[in-house]
Image: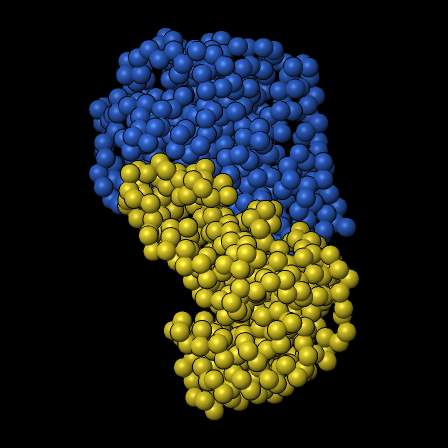
Chain colours: A yellow, B blue
Amino acid sequence: MSENFTFTLKATSGKARLGEITMPRGTIRTPAFMPVGTVGSVKAMYLDQVREGGADIILGNTYHLMLRPGAERVARLGGLHELIRWPYPILTDSGGFQVMSLSGLRKLDEQGVTFKSHIDGSLHHMSPERSIEIQGLLDSDIQMQLDECVALPAEEKEIERAMEMSLRWAERCRVAFGEQPGKAMFGIVQGGDSQALRIRSAEGLKQLDLKGYAVGGLAVGEPQNVMLEMLDITLPVLPSEKPRYLMGVGTPDDILKSVARGIDMFDCVMPTRSGRHGLAFTRRGKVNIRNARHAEDMRPLDEESSCPAARDYSRAYLHHLVRSNEALGGMLLSWNNLSYYQDLMQGIRKAIAEDRFADFQAETLAAWEKGDIDAP
Amino acid sequence: MSENFTFTLKATSGKARLGEITMPRGTIRTPAFMPVGTVGSVKAMYLDQVREGGADIILGNTYHLMLRPGAERVARLGGLHELIRWPYPILTDSGGFQVMSLSGLRKLDEQGVTFKSHIDGSLHHMSPERSIEIQGLLDSDIQMQLDECVALPAEEKEIERAMEMSLRWAERCRVAFGEQPGKAMFGIVQGGDSQALRIRSAEGLKQLDLKGYAVGGLAVGEPQNVMLEMLDITLPVLPSEKPRYLMGVGTPDDILKSVARGIDMFDCVMPTRSGRHGLAFTRRGKVNIRNARHAEDMRPLDEESSCPAARDYSRAYLHHLVRSNEALGGMLLSWNNLSYYQDLMQGIRKAIAEDRFADFQAETLAAWEKGDIDAP
């Protein structure tokens, strides 16, 4: 624990970084995976399970929470941690990404964005200052600047316009955030798939001397190699003594390849969303539990897993639950998947500490490629 | 534990009975409430929670399980207990009730019933013998005779025909079940809302000397007083040394009033189904957590409850989860409701042991009528 938000780089292995963020609500071991609690709940999970699975921090979505229960209401209830029973760090996004993807009738200009709630059609305005105000009302520990994320592919001019405005918004968010020693406000590198714009964005943000830097606008449909290329050219520009967060990413493979390039933090709905759809992540790659070959397989998903969902329940039962649309199927597979992600992060951290990250990455890939255990 | 299925009547208080069923897989304290695990899962619950909440036995639905995963498949997988990880007693219904209510294209005659699966439209035939065979394949501990349950209101002639056929089916089920000392097959009293037919049904079943007796065809839409009247005239006919099970019942008030008449076992989807719809059962009556008055109430549902869902989560959070259709809302309220039901049964058993059941019933009713705790 610490009174101040601090990031300590503890070891490297190649470009992979082992670190630690300390702040009043707890310590975050990096590289870190942050389970997504969109609406104040990591879907189909008890937060005790999320914590026991190894999460140091979870993510809340500003867009969803400002609409329901509402930021002022959350503040009156003592903040998000108190409301949802998670006393550890919480990161909130700025709301911008979901305003763009979920809401209707957007009007965007230099001042901010006006949008219609997807829940009840009510009109809302969000400026950079209001985004930070909302994140403060939620009592978020790591807050994100408001940015404009352009869907790819897009015209270079359009990407540039959005990137430049996002830079100006970063400055306004920094001012709005002010001095809060125990918390942090991160900037977000934009610039689409343009190397030059990514570099300009990173340099502009670096001058603001923020407590951390995110890379945004990736994993929005572009090929993985474009995403990695953007990391390759962006990360060297960012200060090495600050944490780096790749937003909305990704698959276990995305995570390994991004850690290899120096990313410290990740968030993604994939483990829980896939779990609800019958897809399990395991040491031996992805397993579609709906597949008929599991129907009479009484072996667990992975008897060596640390997670009861993977170890104590048969594939036959999981198959039956998912096929029957029973809630327990999604509960168990979400649990398995989040545990798998956290175990992967733990393996990554251990490998960096031992300066054998490249070997760990190769071994992990080899195990995935070996494929699932054979049919009985 | 016991090698044989035995029922011991331990105390009475008025007509209320305290008892114990022992069988190889465990002891069932009666009056007992059996959570319903329709498709091999008590919806949105971990079975560990169901057990810790106080359940000695759960119910499985033959109709659902015979269609998916299929009785022969369950048998190949080691039986239902093994598949779902519940080593304690399981009661299965005969499948008859749901064939009547869920499936299409029924053809019913003396031999049995032919019906179309509601899942894939496939044709199935169920005779009394096949129902017992299926329940055996599931490895059910307490099996129910196949019966025909007539929807009320109905013509007396029609009720009589179905009741008489159900009696003949009880005999066939008894023969098919044979001698299984560690298990039991229960008969089902039918007869609709006719006193005379109910008495004839009970007398006919009594002559078969079964290990237990259920009262069926009630709580199917008739007023509560009709149901209680049927219990009043049926139960004195049944042998007092055998357990009595009121199928598909009911509200906490139904349970109290039925225990007062000598019922020993209950099952109902109400606690879990209501939970998924935002209705919480508490010592102070029913609470609709969707109601706006809970939106900023940080107090728990019931701080004196034995259940973490009732004690450790705020009404404001439960309200938010249910309004937002988050799975966790249904998970927590199902947990609360099952715990409430089991705590009620525990209170009932304690009161009978102390020969103060009537007082307990009055106190419980008074607490419900007092209504929910006041708004803050």
Q: Residue at x 71, y 31 (%)?
A: B366
- In the image shown, does A140 or B150 lie closer to the viewer? A140
* B92 w.r.t. B329: above or below: above
Q: Residue at x 39, y 16 (%)?
A: B183
Instruction: Give residue B144's position: percent from left, percent from top.
Output: 37, 22
Instruction: Give residue A229's position: percent from left, percent from top.
Output: 44, 77
Inspect this view and state whether residue A119 appears: no
Along the horizontal axis of the image, is A370 left or right of B375? left
Q: Residue at x 46, y 20 (%)?
A: B25
- In which quarter of the view is residue A30 placed? bottom right
- In which quarter of the view is residue B116 placed? top left
* B145 w.r.t. A196: above or below: above
Inspect this view and state whether residue B124 appears: yes
What is the quadrant of the N terminus of chain A in the image?
bottom right
- In the image shown, does A58 or B230 lie closer to the viewer? A58
Along the horizontal axis of the image, is A54 left or right of A135? left
Please identify the residue farthest to the bottom as the structure is shown. Answer: A157
Q: Residue at x 72, y 36 (%)?
A: B304
Instruction: Give residue A157's position: percent from left, percent from top.
Output: 47, 91
* B168 w.r.t. B372: above or below: above
What is the quadrant of the C terminus of chain A in the image?
top left
- In the image shown, does A146 or B69 lie closer to the viewer? A146
Please identify the residue farthest to the front as the structure is shown. Answer: A355
Along the horizontal axis of the image, is A225 left or right of A177? left
- In the image shown, does B30 or A195 lie closer to the viewer? A195
Instruction: Give residue A9's position: percent from left, percent from top.
Output: 64, 65
Q: How many marks?
A: 0
Along the horizontal axis of the image, is A145 left or right of B190? right
